Amino acid sequence: MTTTVTGRITVIDDDVRRAAERLRPDAEVAETAARAAWSVLVEPGDGVAGALIGALGANRALRLAMDDEELLPPGLFEPRAFTEAQARWRPRAHARAVRDALESCLDVGGSLLLPGDEHWPLGLDDLGPHAPLALWARGDLNVLNGSTTASIVGARAATPYGEAVAAEIAGDLAAGGTVIISGGAYGIDGAAHRAALGAGGATVAFLAGGIDRAYPIGHQQLFDRIRRSGAVLSEVPCGSAPTKWRFLSRNRAIAAAGMATVVVEAGWRSGSLNTAGHAADLGRPLGAVPGPVSSAASAGCHRLLREYDAVCVTSAREVRELWGESDQTPAPSTKEHPDHVRLRDALSTRTPREPLDIARRSGLSIDRVRSLLGLLALDGTVVQRDDGWQRSG
């Protein structure tokens, strides 16, 4: 399927055009085929490809990249940068690979989103030449037109406290119509997605691999739920494996798609700090949730607060304030949550108690006890001693 004629590599043939027309019957076939080809050729965030397409359009840029007889417009790149880029792209330049990408997307009931489409997340355009060239998608694409979006990320190895806070914030935001964006990973990402779905809201997962693959595999059912009332998106075609580089480049899309980015829990060198860095570079508001000062899982959040001008956030209302939205929701009920009452009743003001003892006395699960202790410690209701927890008063 790959032929070379006078120095030109063919990556779009009749089979590719037919597959492109089947996938996007109401769109321009040439543009669909060219964008699909670029998605196969480049790794996400390739700035040379993005700048070339921005200057020439996807079709002409592809011809220039694949034909040695085409001349590079003067001043667009240093010739060496373009030559090195061609060397990266050409090993993947097979018409069969482009056809397979389109047909695999059709097989799983997916879609191909291009810049300018009705459902294209407009925030991605702020990435300039590093913006996605196309997005492979599954699910209800109407959620991508939500009026407000919030990116919620954090540690994979999250604590019960972190997952509880992420769920509370994401659920409250989603219930108010905000689309929750995250990366589908274990820990904070999963908690945010599940809470949004549980609140009857919408959520979007940006994947580092193909939209036909569940990664992590333990989130297969979660991704199925997301597709029913939200969307999963990826810059790489079906069948593509998630790699370390793709996780890092995926983070820039998560940051760009949200009106604000909130880091709930993150270690000192967490990948979530990479997402936070992209948000800061884009001028997006950045929030961080504080945690216990002794918790390594919150060290990255404290670093963001101290060194990167992140805003301390502890609730959905404070997240909305990041993008200037005043909270128009009714005042919260003064009635205390039953679990809070049970936990407080199980605590003593004099004798510190271990979480397992508190769980036995309250009838709550040990994980629920630990998460509530972390939340109540923030407002001073409980205090941790060397030998356990006790009620502050």
Image: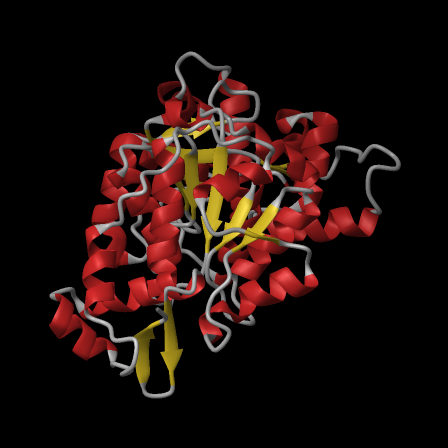
Q: Is residue 313 above or below residue 349?
A: above
Q: Quadrant of the N terminus?
A: top left
- Pick out the residue farthest to the right: 75
- In front here: 358 or 200? 358
Q: Where residue 173 appears, x then y in whole percent?
A: 40, 37
Image-based side of 343 in relation to 160, left or right: left
- In front here: 292 or 280? 292
- Residue at coordinates 42% horizontally, 11% vertically from top-left? 26
- Residue at coordinates 54% horizontally, 30% vertically from top-left? 326
Image-based side of 182 in relation to 167, left or right: right
Q: Is residue 203 above or below residue 78?
A: above
- Residue at coordinates 55% horizontally, 30% vertically from top-left? 325
Let me know if residue 254 appears in the view.
yes
Let me know if residue 7 appears in the view.
no
Q: Where residue 328 appears, x then y in whole percent?
A: 46, 27
- In front here: 263 or 128? 263
